[in-house]
Image: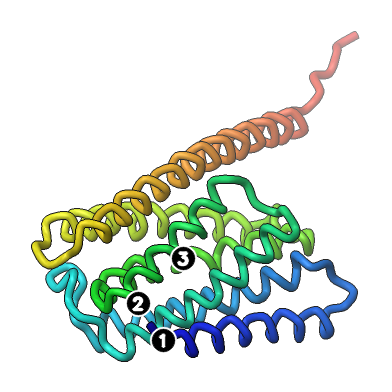
Amino acid sequence: MPALEVICSLIGWLCLYLLFCSTFSHRGPEWNCRLVTLTHGVIIVLLTAYVVFVDGPWPFTHAGTENTDLQIFALAVCLGYFFFDLGWCVCYRSEGPVMLAHHAASIVGILLALLMGVSGCETCGVIFGSEITNPLLQSRWFLRQLGLYDSLLGDAVDLLFILLFATVRVGLGTVMFYCELTSPRTLLIMKLGGVVMYLLAWVFMVDIARFGYKKTRAKYRKWMVNRELKETSEEKPVGHEE
């Protein structure tokens, strides 16, 4: 268990948060915490993408294999962040039970992979799929705070977020879940952890689908109203003959 790396990661994310707090002192704590979350999302997606697609091994075929040094480093960086973010969420009571359960399950899963020294490749794959939508989620929040959400940019962010979540986290996540369950090398406890993360992904997917439906319906109604107003304004008044 690389305890020192995890502690250094936790201290690093905490220091980054304090740096943002001093730099953006006119903003609230959530603004600065989300900046840390955005930074972590970008860094961990790039790091786990390299681990999964370049360094290897391939998680779809090597689930349950021994951890590599780079996998351990990526897991330690991510675990330190989740410790920081869970502590912040509990302190400020900013998240509901589902998100707290997601954070707790992520911490337990990463801890198990580090303690047992196996399943690092599929754990990094799950982290990649889970975090690839995170920068878009944070961008959506920042657009709201800046008053730019109700625009073409806000619609593009929402659309890309929904597509990525559905295709990567749920679509590829289903394949990853199947490979983990059928792998003879994966330990039972890691398979149970995979079940929890997969169920949580579907809970989020249902909420996202509802949001997408409501937003699409609202956009359609707004378009119909604008169309009717435009047609009304273009109508010429009919003259009366004396």
Q: Name the residue furthest top.
A: 242
Q: Residue at x 52, y 65 (%)?
A: 134
Q: Is residue 8 left or right of residue 131?
A: right
Name the residue located 24 percent from the left edge and 75 percent from the top edge: 118
Q: CA distance from mark 3 to mark 2?
A: 11 Å
The number of numbered badges drawn on the structure is 3
Q: CA distance from mark 1 to mark 3?
A: 14 Å
| Residue 52 pos. (x, y %) | 28, 79
Which label's residue is closer to the chain start, 3 or 2?
A: 3
Q: Quadrant of the N terminus?
A: bottom left
Q: Secondary structure at mark 3?
A: helix
For label 2, the residue is 114
Q: Residues within 10 Å of mark 2 (few under 14, many from 20)?
A: many
- Circle 3 is placed at which residue position? 107
Which residue corresponds to the image point at 18% horizontal and 69% vertical from the top-left?
63
* Cβ atoms at labels 1 and 3 below 8 Å apart: no
121 left or right, relative to 60: right
> How far across and how far down the image is residue 147, in percent?
78, 59
The kind of residue tagged 2 is: Leu
Q: Disc 1 marks which amino acid?
A: Pro
Q: Earlier in the sequence, mark 2 or mark 1?
A: 1
Asked whether 18 or 108 is in front, the reply is: 108
Instruction: Give the labeled residue for mark 1.
Output: 2
Residue 48 found in image quarter = bottom left
Q: Is the Cβ of the residue at disc 3 closer than 8 Å to that at disc 2?
A: no
Query: Is disc 2 in contact with disc 1, using a CB cutoff of under 8 Å?
Result: yes
Which quarter of the picture shows residue 164? bottom left
